[in-house]
Image: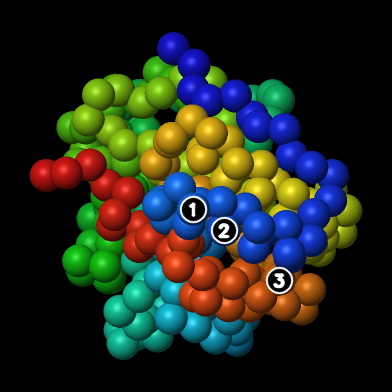
Amino acid sequence: MTYLPRVAAATAAEWPDLGAELDRWEEAGRIAPLWWRDDDAVAATPRLDRLLAVAGGAPLALAVIPAQAESGLADRLADEGRVAVLQHGWSHANHAIQGKKSEYPAERPAAEIAVELAEGRARLAALFGARALPVLVPPWNRFADRFASLLPGLGIAALSQMAPRKSLPPAGIAVADVHLDLTAWREGRGFVGTGAALGRLIAELRARRGRGERTAIGVLTHHLVMDAATEDFLARLGETVAAHPAARWLPASDLLPPR
């Protein structure tokens, strides 16, 4: 079973184009849902402070690496009610023998994976309490399909990767994917550019509006490499979402299946 195909994105778009698309959502009596995931958090740093400042009042989901997570991060987030914690694998280590990096390549023993994920869940719960949601974010957004059946037994309720995905997780595991990565990894790790980012976002919005789909569009950032151009884009996006009646940020908890 395949998941949704990648939608075609315009090579460039401008802010008025986003406003026009959201106007169409309003005309249809619908609200466009977005959510925000930031990866690789382990400590309270000035860069994390910058991320929280840019986010303002928007709900934010931090993918935290359990094996490296510091108690100072929990202290920093203690009064940040809008911030949820997701499980970013275990140690963000590459175990792939060949090919693309993955902490969970198919060649690893399933029993070993189960132990790691259980330890990660326990560590995040101990550090962050109820703030730690049962959402797995595999490092590099890769998780071999053969391990998906482990998730329900480990108490994991959702899997968050980069869309489009080749297959859906098992029944009972929600999909909480991201669709727009703002980091240009192959071009100096800077911002992908306003035109490209808006083009991708608008394409996702347009596709959902056309299909009547209600899944949230995920925006992905990495605060440890976030530059000023990315911050400016996020600030402008936040202002746009806050001002338009047909757009809103969803907390990560809203992406979980009903209990």
Q: Residue 95: x, y in percent?
A: 57, 34
**Mark sitting earlier along the chain (1/3):** 1
Instruction: In this rendered view, identify the residue nearer to me: 41 or 194.
Output: 194
Name the mark nearer the viewer: 3 or 2: 2
Q: Residue 13: x, y in percent?
A: 80, 54
Q: CA distance from mark 3 to mark 2?
A: 20 Å
Q: Residue 176: x, y in percent?
A: 41, 43
Residue 23 marker? 2
> Element type at marker 2?
helix
Amino acid type, mark 3: Phe
Callout 3: 10 Å neighbours few (<14), some, many (20+)? some
Total count of labels: 3
Q: Quadrant of residue 69?
A: bottom left
Query: Are the residues tagged 1 and 2 within 8 Å (C-beta)?
Result: yes
Instruction: In this rendered view, identify the residue nearer to me: 229 or 241.
Output: 241
**Mark sitting earlier along the chain (3/2):** 2
Q: Quadrant of residue 212?
A: top left
Tell which residue pokes out farthest to the right in this image.
Answer: 187
> Element type at marker 3?
helix
The residue shown at (23%, 42%) is: 257
